[in-house]
Amino acid sequence: MKRFALMFTLLAACTTGAATNASCPTENAPSYAAFGQPFFATYCTGCHSATASDRHGAPASQNYDTEDDVREHAGEIDAMAAAGPDATNTAMPQLGGGVDHRPSSTEREQLGAFLACMSAAP
């Protein structure tokens, strides 16, 4: 039974979620300065930063230090941590690396909207 639980945990950790298909709101769209930067500082860059002293297993290619970094990985972030009409992804963030609580459902929805706005921007 313990092996089954361990295998399930490992499998869950290796899978990614689905695209949320969140949309960018036409009014009061979340910006990097007001939403993105604080969200990533709170939940992501403790591990996903070029300057992180302990990445806790985060891939070296996944850094979210700047708006451009986030834009480059928006689809992957969406599939791991955001929420929208088609999916709620909760694989990230993992606790540790400076993260002591997970984002709320509202924050995950805001993340989905923010990433959709980034994808829509030229």
Image: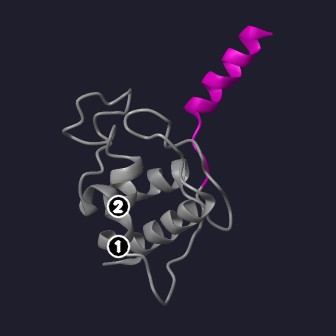
Residue 69 x %, y %: 27, 55
Taking depth in this image into account, of 53 and 70 the one nearest to the observer is 53
Mark 1, secondary structure of its residue? helix
Render colour scheme: one colour
Which residue is at 61% across, 23% downward?
Answer: 10
Residue 92 x %, y %: 51, 43
Which residue is at 30% across, 78% downward?
Answer: 122
The rendered magenta stretch, by its main secondary structure, is classed as helix
Residue 76 against residue 9 in the figure, above or below: below
Residue 55 against residue 67 in the figure, above or below: above
Q: Are marks 1 and 2 in contact (CB under 8 Å)?
A: yes
Residue 91 x %, y %: 57, 41
Question: For mark 2, does the 10 Å Cα neighbourhood hold few (<14), some (14 to 19), or many (20 or more) residues?
Answer: few
Q: Going by the image, does 98 lie left or right of 4?
A: left
Question: For mark 1, does the 10 Å Cα neighbourhood hold few (<14), some (14 to 19), or many (20 or more) residues?
Answer: few
Task: Say which quarter of the image contains residue 72.
Answer: bottom left
Q: Which residues are magenta?
A: 1-18
Residue corresponding to mark 2 = 38
Q: Which mark is residue 99?
A: none
Which residue is at 32% across, 31% downward?
Answer: 55
| Amino acid of disc 1 | Ala
Q: Which mark is residue 34?
A: 1
| Amino acid of disc 2 | Pro
Q: Examine the structure image and report whether residue 8 is included in the region drawn in magenta.
A: yes
Q: Examine the structure image and report whether residue 57 is included in the region drawn in magenta.
A: no
The furthest residue to the bottom: 27
The furthest residue to the front: 100
Which residue is at 44% across, 32% downward?
Answer: 96
Taking depth in this image into account, of 104 and 9 the one nearest to the observer is 104
- Residue 73 shows up from this direction: no
Residue 96 against residue 71 in the figure, above or below: above
The furthest residue to the right: 1
